[in-house]
Image (cartoon, rainbow, N blue to C red):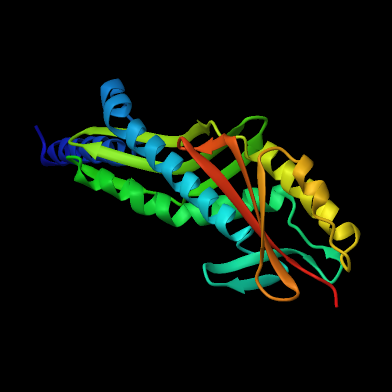
């Protein structure tokens, strides 16, 4: 065999090896999803974190009325949103409160799912996006959070998760809006007698000569089996 032919064989062999190497390196990454791993380890943690984070956010909203109000009143227990000020109804919409709940829950949720790092293997997390929707009798929560969980050669992708919290926030806030409408109707001569017709109990606390704190509670509207309180402030027109 001539020297030129040997060189051609060597070059051909190198090219074949190079092609095989490139195919191995640049082949699409396959995501293997072991059912038991997702069901038993990842989903329960993510779901519980999602539920607890949003539930805590709703408690904050109940205590403050709104976390981003147009007007705020300072109380001994902390800031409370003013839903009526100088004769104007300034209470937030239900859609605004949905956005507030999602925003408040995002950071605690990210911290909570950090416990997944205790599982064997490596975990890589993308950006979290949470949406909260108040439906009839429930709170529907959806999270888009890409999680790559790799154990050895096996890799799991968890992308979207959702939970439903049995909590009638929408119905309760309907009563809040009704109370606000009654109190804003005649801000100079507040008539609170109509509030007694609302479901549950309505407590009025006079903070100053021109500011009062209103707390609504319904025994059958519970969050985590605990009666839920919703507070807002009213500033009387001078």
Q: Quadrant of residue 21?
A: top left
**Residue depicted at 63% across the width and 59% down the height:** 66
Q: Pinpoint residue 72: horizontal percent, then vertical percent.
A: 67, 71
**Is residue 179 in sight in this rendering?**
yes
Q: Position of residue 237 (x, y in %)?
A: 85, 73
When the figure is inspected, residue 187 is found, relative to residue 146, above or below; the finding is below
Q: Residue at x 74, y 42 (%)?
A: 174
Q: Give the residue drawn at x 66%, y 39%.
A: 200
| Residue placed most toward the observer, 10 or 77 | 77
Q: Is residue 60 left or right of residue 2?
A: right
Residue 30 visible at all: no
Outermost residue, front direction? Answer: 193
**The image quarter in which residue 16 lies:** top left
Viewer-proximal residue, 106 or 3?
Answer: 106
- Viewer-nearest residue: 126 or 105: 105
Q: Residue at x 53, y 72 (%)?
A: 76
Which part of the image, by quadrant, shows the N terminus? Answer: top left
**Rendering coords of residue 127 (x, y %):** 46, 52
In the foreground, 55 or 153: 55
Q: Tell me: residue 63, above or below residue 41.
A: below
Q: How many marks?
A: 0
| Image quarter of residue 224 | top left
Q: Is residue 12 found left or right of 48 in the rendered image?
A: left
- The picture places residue 92, in percent across and down from the top left corner, at 73, 56
């Amino acid at each position: 065999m001539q020297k030129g032919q040997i060189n051609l064989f060597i070059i051909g062999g190198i090219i074949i090896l190079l092609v095989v190497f490139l195919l191995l390196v640049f082949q699409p990454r396959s995501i293997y999803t072991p059912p038991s791993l997702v069901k038993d380890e990842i989903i329960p943690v993510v779901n519980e974190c999602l539920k607890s984070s949003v539930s805590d956010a709703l408690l904050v909203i109940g205590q403050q009325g709104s976390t981003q109000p147009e007007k705020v009143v300072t109380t001994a227990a902390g800031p409370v949103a003013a839903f009526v000020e100088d004769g104007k109804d300034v209470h937030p919409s239900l859609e605004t409160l949905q956005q507030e709940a999602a925003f408040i829950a995002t950071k605690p949720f990210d911290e909570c799912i950090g416990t997944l790092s205790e599982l064997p293997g490596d975990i890589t997390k993308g950006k979290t996006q949470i949406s909260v929707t108040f439906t009839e009798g429930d709170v529907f929560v959806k999270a888009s959070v890409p999680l790559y969980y790799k154990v050895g050669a096996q890799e799991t992708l968890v992308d979207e998760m959702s939970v439903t919290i049995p909590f009638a926030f929408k119905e309760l806030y309907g009563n809040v809006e009704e109370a606000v409408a009654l109190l804003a109707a005649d801000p100079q001569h507040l008539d609170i007698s109509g509030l007694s017709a609302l479901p549950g109990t309505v407590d009025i606390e006079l903070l100053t000569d021109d500011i009062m704190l209103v707390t609504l509670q319904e025994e059958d509207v519970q969050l985590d089996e605990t009666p839920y309180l919703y507070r807002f402030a009213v500033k009387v027109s001078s």
